[in-house]
Image (spheres, coloured by chain):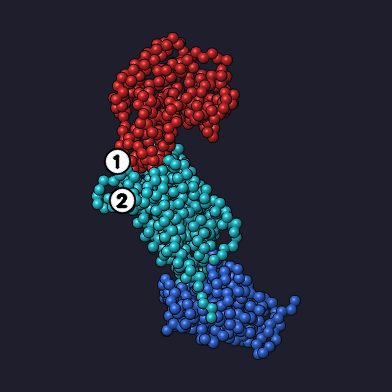
Amino acid sequence: MVSIAKQYTEIIYALGAEKNLVAVDLSSTYPDAAKQLPTVGYHRALSAEGILAVKPDLILHDNNIGPEHVVKQLEDLKIPMHVFKKYTDNILGTDSLIREMGAYFNQRKAADSLCKLLDADMTLALEKVRQYKDTVKVLVIHYGQASNVYLVMTQKSTAAKMLGWAGGKITVTDEKGMKQLSPEAIAAADPDVILLTDFGYDKLGSLEKIKELPGLAKTRAAISNRIYRVEEHDLVYLGPRTGKNVLALQKLIHETVVH
Amino acid sequence: MKRLFTKQNLHNSSFPGLLLLLLLCIIVSTRYGAVNISVGEMISALQKLAGNEELTLNERIFIGIRLPRALLSAVVGASLATGGTLMQALFRNPIVEPGLIGISSGAAFGAALYFVAGAGFGFYTGEWTLPLAATLGALLAAALVFVLSTSKETGKRSVISLLLTGIAVNALFMSGVGFLSYTARDPQARSITFWNLGTLSGASWKSLLICTTVTLSCIVWSLRYAKQLNSLMLGEEEAQHLGVNTRRLRLQILILNVVMVATCTAFVGVIGFVGLIIPHFLRMLLGSDNRLLIRNSAVAGGILLSLADLSARMLLRPAELPIGIVLSIIGVPVFILLLRKKTYYF
Amino acid sequence: MITVHQLNYSIGNKVLLQDINLRFEAGKISLIIGANGAGKSTLLKTLCRQLIPVSGEIKMGHKPLSQFGNNELARIRAVLSQHIDLAFPLRVEEVVMMGRYPHFNNRPDKIDYNVCKAALESFDLSAFADRNYLTLSGGEKQLVHFARVMAQTWHPQEGYDRYLLLDEPLTFLDIQHQYQFMKMLLKIARENRVIVGVVHDLNLAAQFADHLVLLHQGKILASGTPTEVLTISNITTAFNIKPVIQEQHGKPLISFSV
């Protein structure tokens, strides 16, 4: 079995259904065990042969794979593929997906307890939000900075939903989930908190270096040292840990003591 | 009495030799990859196919993916190398390749336009639309290079002005591609990027059929012009004295070349260097007679590209390298080595 | 035989050739002389069909030049120019074989090989046959091309004369090669070919030409034997410098004093 969707991979492990999993795609980075498996490459630049090399009798993907001809090649070779239903991108939808996958892998009980846990965490988070008076303005930078342009997440992104539940908000708008912003646009957005995903943060190295970046330097977030590193897989899709992740975000943007 | 043309006989035997080598390369390229397929499996797959029997997974990989891919790499290599040989003969210059007069970037632009606008405007999107868009883009770019590099006063084209105009037009069309991929929606932009890197992973029997039909007929057709292209080595006027209609020759070779290279480029993306290295290498080996060069460069191009594609599949198993990267890694050092060897020998 | 009748050629308002009437006969060496810009090259280019006259007619034999097919013309008429360089390396024998291109479709036959061989031998080039053309000296290169254009019109074609047009073929040759070249030309002329050439050197022209044409400002100033054409008044008009003319072996010998 090969999973080419990070959300599926996480749920498979959470359900304890990973026994037959032999390979995952490059962005399936949670849990750590998934990283130990062979990868079949980036989910948008797959090669049919690369997948076939692990001799899968089932490929799980969420239709967000490419290039197009690979899907066709796999279909032509009659390799069994399964796509779970597409649910709305919220907690209810995530519950449904977990339950569907639980049924598929015959792990209904585990799915049930995952959903209960998720719902409980979310209830707690949403209660806590009421305690905070202010809504924190957050900017999420993905992959860091390239040729002085920043790839940021917009109101349409999954991260925006999670931050909303956590009592923050993303002000960048666009039709797509990500947008490229120039340093000037970043300065104008003037966020209270800046989150960098792991890859970008680690590439830049340290808080000090990040604070000096063009456009970031004069923001409230930089002045008050509220620039944090987050794991990409905690922020870009919903899963069984989303409740916990929202709680962690809450803590990060509302309760962390500012130096 | 001294016998003439003794080397010619030796050179004539190079073609069957290279052909045999190509066959070997295709078999090796079919044999190895992320999944290894034994010769026994190949044979049994073909037998079962003839008998309409159920195939095993490996046999299906061999028939469905590996074989069309290995064959396509040979066909595309033949197209690019022959294109290079024809261009060099036409412009009387050994550093010209199809990409230089805008064919690749024009084709890339046509394809990008197709990816972005084609679906948007609801164009018919059949099997031939992408190659057609690429060919039209290539024709446009090549025509632009040609018209702009022609001197107003003399109506002639110096190689320098041709190369410089080529660089300018290439830059124009590549920024057009950049613009399109920047404004494109996500999957479209990804298609463009992927296409620009060049890859044979999308090979199918259908694309193989189209590329083979176009390439083979263009190569066979171009053989008719080999002698005339030889005369052109003496210069345009001398060729005319030998009875060649040089204007018509240029036009025909150019169109032939654009159609052949753009069609292949449409399916596999931009692949450079083949059209530069192969003619150079063969000229060292066989001399400059185009009657020998054209057919041999077709076969040698096939050999180079099928080996390059094999490396692209093997080096980072099970992931794949874009073939352009592999060719540059092999091509650049070889090319510099060739350039530094100033004189040719036979 | 080439006949030129009332030939005119101009670019825009600039008249380059005016009312040219000439006849070049077989078996003779006809040479065209004149100052720079007098129209020598233009005249030769119209004879080669590289320039199309504005008015007038050129006939090769009885057939107007404009009615020849490309290959038909190439089989009976060869042109030798100055300083030809190859874009790619070729063996000498391959260059000479190019002269046979108008005669075969794809592969040369036995006649073509034999002609190549004979042409190489007649220019003492047999030892060079498989040498790389690009490694030869200037004189050797020009001889190879001479052999090539000779191979082009080696055998007479039925119903046609054979023509050899020369566009300043001596320009880049040293004295020894110039004389070797002209002597070869004498030999060829005896084979009943029509030979028309443009040269610069008046004494060479005087010595070897059977028929001289002196052009001045796009018109024919004089046409005839060297003695008839190379007079003090003609040369003074055409070149704007006064010559001293002596006689040597029955031909005029021209020198200029400072």
Is residue B155 visible to the viewer in this orientation of the structure?
no
Chain shown cyan: that is B
x 51%, y 69%: residue:
B237
Judged left or right of residue C121, residue A245 is left
Chain shown blue: that is C
Q: Position of residue A109 (x, y in %)?
A: 31, 19
Q: Secondary structure at mark 2?
A: helix
Reply above or below: A211 against B271: above
Chain A pictured colour: red
Q: Which residue is mark 2?
A: B44
Q: Amino acid at mark 1?
A: Lys
Chain where mark 2 sits: B
Q: Residue furthest left?
A: B52
User: Which residue is nearer to you in this view: B139 or A193?
Assistant: A193
**Which label was assigned to residue A78?**
1
x 54%, y 28%: residue:
A202
Q: Position of residue B286 (x, y in %)?
A: 50, 65
Q: Residues within 10 Å of mark 1 (few under 14, many from 20)?
A: few
